[in-house]
Amino acid sequence: MCLEFDLFSDFFARRENFLQRLDCRLKLVIALAGTGAVLASSQPVFPVLIFGPAVVGLLLLRLPANMVMRRYLPVLGMALALLALHGFMFGSHPIFTIPLGPCCLTLFADGLRHGVVAAVRLLTAFTVLLLLGVVTPAHDLFRALAWLRLPRQWVEIAMMTYRYIFVLLDDAADIAAAQKIRLGYVGPRRGLASLSVLAGSVLIRALDQSRRTHEAMIARAYTQELPFAPMPVLSVKSMAATVFFLIIIAAFYWVCEGRMLI
C-alpha cells in the first residue's frame, strides 16, 4: 500500500501516545456518547464545547495537514450544503432576497440559525470520530463493537468493508497510473472516457474480489461467523474513567441545553 493510502488508514493510530494507550472500549463509549449528545443538541454551545477539546487533541497528535484536510473537505462541503438549505428554504424572517427571473431566492434569519446549529453539530461529530480513529486501530474498534454486543453481522460487514476498501484503492491507483501513461486524461473528453473505464474496471474487480474472498472463506471452514479475539476484563480504573467522563458529558449537556430550554 502506498503512503498516499496510508494517510486514510489507521497508520497513525499505531503511534505511541497517551490516547492510544487507553482502553479502546473506554474511548469508543465516550466517543459514541459525545457524538450522540452533539447530534441531539438544539443549541450550538454544547457542540462547540466538545469541538474545542477534540481539535486540541488533533493538534497535539501532530497529524499531517494534508491528511486532516482530505478528511475534512467532504464534511465541510456537507456543512455548507446544510447551511444553504436551511438558510434559503426554511424560515419566516427574511434577511435579503435575490431575484432570479420569475423566481427569487430569500435568505431567512431563523433558517440560517438552524443551519448554523446543524453545521456545527456535523463538524463536531466528525471531529470526535476522527480523533477516535487516529488514536485507535481499526481492529481494536471492531473488537470493542463486538464486545458491546452489536449485531455480529454488522461488525463483520464493517470489518470486511474496511479491509477491502484499500485493495480496491490499490487497483484503482494501478489502473489510473496506466491510463495516465497512455495519455488517457489529455483533454476533458478523453479524461471523461478514461474515468468511466476506471469506474467500470473497479466495479468488475470488486465483484470478482467478493467471489474470490467468499471462496477462500469457505475453503477455510467459514461457519457464517468470523472469530474475534477475546477482550481482556475491563479494569476498575477504566470503568471509573468511563463513568466519570459520561457524567461530565451529561452535566455539560444539561447545562447547555436544559437551562436554555427553560
Image (spheres, helix red, strand yellow):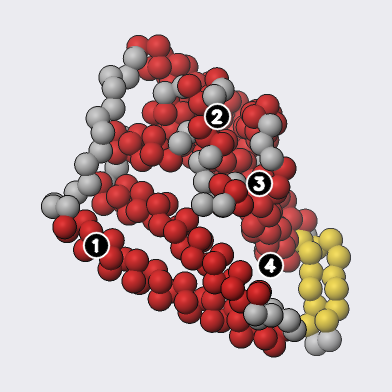
Location of mark 4 (residue): 89
- Dot 3: what SS? helix
**Marks 1 and 2, how far apart at CA:** 33 Å
Location of mark 3 (residue): 67
- Left or right: where 196 falls relative to 86: left
* Nearer-N-terminus badge (3/2): 2
Q: Nearer the viewer, residue 83 or 176?
A: 176
Q: Position of residue 1 (x, y in %)?
A: 51, 52
* Nearer-N-terminus badge (1/3): 3
Instruction: Tell me what residue is drawn at x 73 percent, y 66 percent.
Output: 88
Q: Position of residue 8 (x, y in %)?
A: 56, 49
**Marks 3 and 2, how far apart at CA:** 15 Å
- Left or right: where 214 falls relative to 92: left
Location of mark 2 (residue): 15
Pointer 3 local density, CA inside 10 Å: few below 14, some 14–19, many at least 20: some
* Nearer-N-terminus badge (4/1): 4
Mark 3: which amino acid?
Answer: Met
- Dot 2: what SS? loop
